[in-house]
Image (cartoon, rainbow, N blue to C red):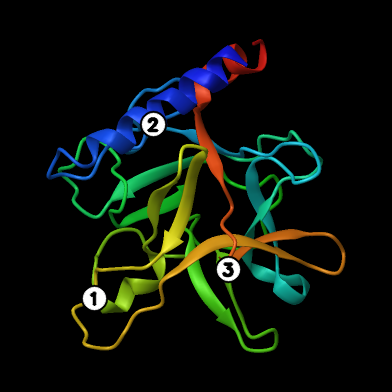
């Protein structure tokens, strides 16, 4: 509980700083430390118990085998698979809010019949008329051809963070989709990451800090 209160106080402090700095504020992890590119973090729901916990691999919509989808881990309190973040600016030393970035699982799935990448992307499913978050995206090479692979992290008040799909990497005059990443519930209970009006609110735990977090 003390660590959770400390994490929330860092979020509050960062929200005040955003009015005084030109650069977007760094995203902070559960311990209040700035998130760094290339470092492993677990993405964990701020509402554990009944809503799942971390994120992991799953079958695609309609039980498609490939590419693999991004889903909430089951059972609840499962940390899932860690991810890394890659900002659009390769020289950036921290991950910042409101800034385009790639997200990818840093570990492979336990069983994998697909040969695609672990990078997240948004894909529209025609049958379900829904945008889902899948793997097999492209890391880097910002531009219109990779627009589906770029996400942002935003504060959600003082509660936690959310992922947003609103890429700014394409100079096209066409309007890009701008929506939160939330949860889509399959009939079988699978919780899929998908574009939604209700965000999936999370915090981040550095992989090497997992033992200290679970012991508090």
The residue singled out by tag 2 in the image is 12
The residue singled out by tag 3 in the image is 196
**Dots 2 and 3: beta carbons under 8 Å?**
no
Number of the front mark, 3 or 1? 3
Return the residue found at the far left.
22
- Going from N to C along the chain, the mark reached first, 3 or 1, is 1
The residue singled out by tag 1 in the image is 170
- Going from N to C along the chain, the mark reached first, 2 or 3, is 2
Under circle 1, the secondary element is: loop
**Corner quadrant of residue 182:** bottom right
- Going from N to C along the chain, the mark reached first, 1 or 2, is 2
Under circle 2, the secondary element is: helix
Q: How far apart are marks 3 and 1 (CA)?
A: 22 Å
Can you give x and y, in whole percent of width and height, for residue 1 in the image?
Answer: 63, 16
**Corner quadrant of residue 138:** bottom left
Can you give x and y, in whole percent of width and height, for residue 154 in the image?
Answer: 39, 50
Near mark 2 (Cα within 10 A), the count class, few <14, some 14-19 or many ≥20, is some
| Residue at x 64% of width, y 11% of height | 216
| Closer to the camera in the image, 174 or 106 | 174
Residue 49 marker: none
Can you give x and y, in whole percent of width and height, for residue 54 in the image?
Answer: 64, 41
């Amino acid at each position: 509980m003390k660590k959770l209160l400390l994490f929330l106080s860092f979020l509050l402090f960062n929200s005040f700083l955003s009015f005084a700095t030109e650069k977007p504020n760094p995203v902070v992890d559960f311990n209040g430390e700035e998130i760094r590119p290339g470092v492993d973090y677990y993405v964990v729901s701020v509402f554990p118990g009944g809503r799942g916990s971390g994120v992991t691999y799953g079958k695609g919509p309609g039980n498609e085998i490939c590419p693999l989808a991004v889903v909430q881990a089951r059972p609840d309190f499962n940390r899932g698979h860690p991810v890394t973040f890659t900002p659009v600016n390769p020289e950036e030393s921290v991950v910042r809010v409101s800034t385009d970035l790639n997200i990818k699982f840093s570990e492979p799935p336990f069983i994998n019949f697909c040969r695609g990448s672990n990078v997240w992307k948004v894909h529209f499913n025609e049958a379900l008329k829904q945008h889902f978050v899948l793997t097999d995206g492209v890391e880097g090479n910002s531009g219109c051809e990779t627009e589906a692979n770029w996400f942002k992290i935003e504060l959600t008040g003082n509660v936690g963070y959310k992922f947003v799909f609103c890429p700014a990497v394409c100079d096209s005059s066409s309007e890009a989709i701008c929506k939160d990443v939330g949860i889509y519930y399959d009939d079988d209970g699978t919780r899929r990451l998908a574009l939604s009006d209700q965000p999936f609110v999370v915090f981040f735990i550095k992989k090497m800090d997992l033992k200290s977090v679970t012991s508090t």
